[in-house]
Amino acid sequence: MEEKNYKAYYYLIIFPVLFGVYFHLDGNINVLVYDLLSLDPNSLFTSAIHFFIYEVIKVLILLSVIVFTVGIIRSYFSPEKTRKALEGKPLFAGNIMASLLGIVTPFCSCSAIPLFLGFVEARIPLGVTFSFLIAAPMINEVAVILLFGLFGWKTAVIYILTGLLIAIAAGWIIGRLKLERFVEPWVYEIKSAGNNAGEEKINFASRIDYGVMAVKDIVSKVWLYVVIGIAVGAGVHGYVPENFMAGIMGKDVWWSVPLSVLIGIPLYSNAAGIIPVVQSLIEKGASLGTSLAFMMSVIGLSLPEMIILKKVLKLPLICVFIGVVGTGIVTVGYLFNIIY
């Protein structure tokens, strides 16, 4: 069994090669667009095409390499281990730990209910549970990879830190409000089976296979969003006049932050689809704080997740959740409009 898994180590060679391609990408795209395709460097169409080809290849390379790495890390975490790590933690410490675990734990909107039920069954406080549910979809590896690739490491770090701050603060506030009465009664009657079953130990070659499976699973689900998002961004990049967005989403427009959050809440997109659009909006004059607020509301307060959570939460708790997280996002938006 161990010998059959040795082929997995070949993937450790492939991904550094992809990084080499990434660092020489700009020159190769220039050759393709300007020399091989002979497009006019001064035309708006050429600007849009260059942006599209460069960003699609760059983002897909970054996505594959980092999802592979995070996939290996995630093989050390299971929902059961996550629940055990959070059991018995006091409220604020639990909020911090839950938010940090949310970054590296597999999560999507469709798994919101199973995770919520598991946390409640393990008697993890409601506020701690919400810190996890906020951090996991908002600060996922796709968002961080795209932000790093399109904006640079400083913006990616800002996003991670502010996302964590929102998750910790919102979970703490929800916990202090004692809103357990707004959880559907049947949730507390659930008794899960098999929680004490031992977990299978796997070798590192199998963890590499897990990383490869993560690349196949995640990239196959988001590549179309990446292409569509970058295509929209390329159109904005090539054809929207410079500083056009300053009058709508600029830092001097006081109502731009709350309006962008209200617009973002009912929209449905993931990080792969919305971040390339946000990049182009910023290039055309939108402020960083307003753009981050819009992006966070789309990713962190998605309508499908609210609909799914309605099965286990009563409407007042969902409204409190949206209000607290939305207020945190608006605050972050104004803060970064002041700083930048």
Image: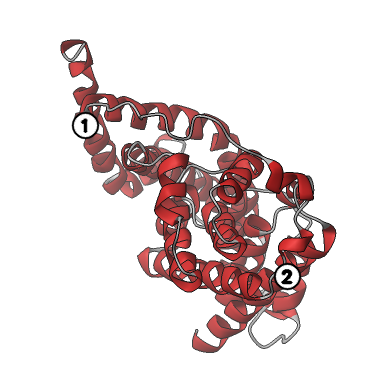
**Position of residue 68 measured from the top left corner of the image (x, y, whole percent):** 35, 37
Residue 41 in view, yes or no: yes
Q: Position of residue 167 (x, y in %)?
A: 55, 66
Lower position in the chain sequence, tag 1 or tag 2 = 1
Residue 215 numbered tag = none
Which amino acid, mark 1?
Leu
At a point 67% along the width and 48% down the height, the residue shown is 269
Q: Is residue 339 above or below residue 145?
A: below
**Frontmost residue, 21 versus 179:** 179
Which residue lies under the disc numbered 2? Answer: 260
Q: Residue at x 55, y 89 (%)?
A: 338
Q: Quick one: 306 or 291, which is closer to the camera?
A: 306
Q: Amino acid at mark 2?
A: Ser
Dot 2 crowding, Cα within 10 Å, few <14, some 14–19, many 20+: many
Q: CA distance from mark 1 to mark 2?
A: 42 Å
**Most extreme residue toward the right, as rendered?**
315
Q: Is residue 305 left or right of residue 331?
A: right
**Pointer 1 local density, CA inside 10 Å: few below 14, some 14–19, many at least 20:** few
**Above or below for 258 versus 112:** below
Residue 141 coordinates in the image, percent (x, y): 44, 49
Residue placed under numbered mark 1 in the picture: 12
In depth, the one of 317 and 306 nearer the eye is: 317
Q: Residue at x 56, y 49 (%)?
A: 119
Residue 242 showing in the rendered view: no
- Give the mark count: 2
Q: Are marks 1 and 2 in contact (CB under 8 Å)?
A: no
Which of the image's four quarters has the N terminus?
top left
**Camera-side residue: 313 or 47?**
313
Q: How is the image coloured?
A: secondary structure
Q: Position of residue 302 (x, y in %)?
A: 70, 53
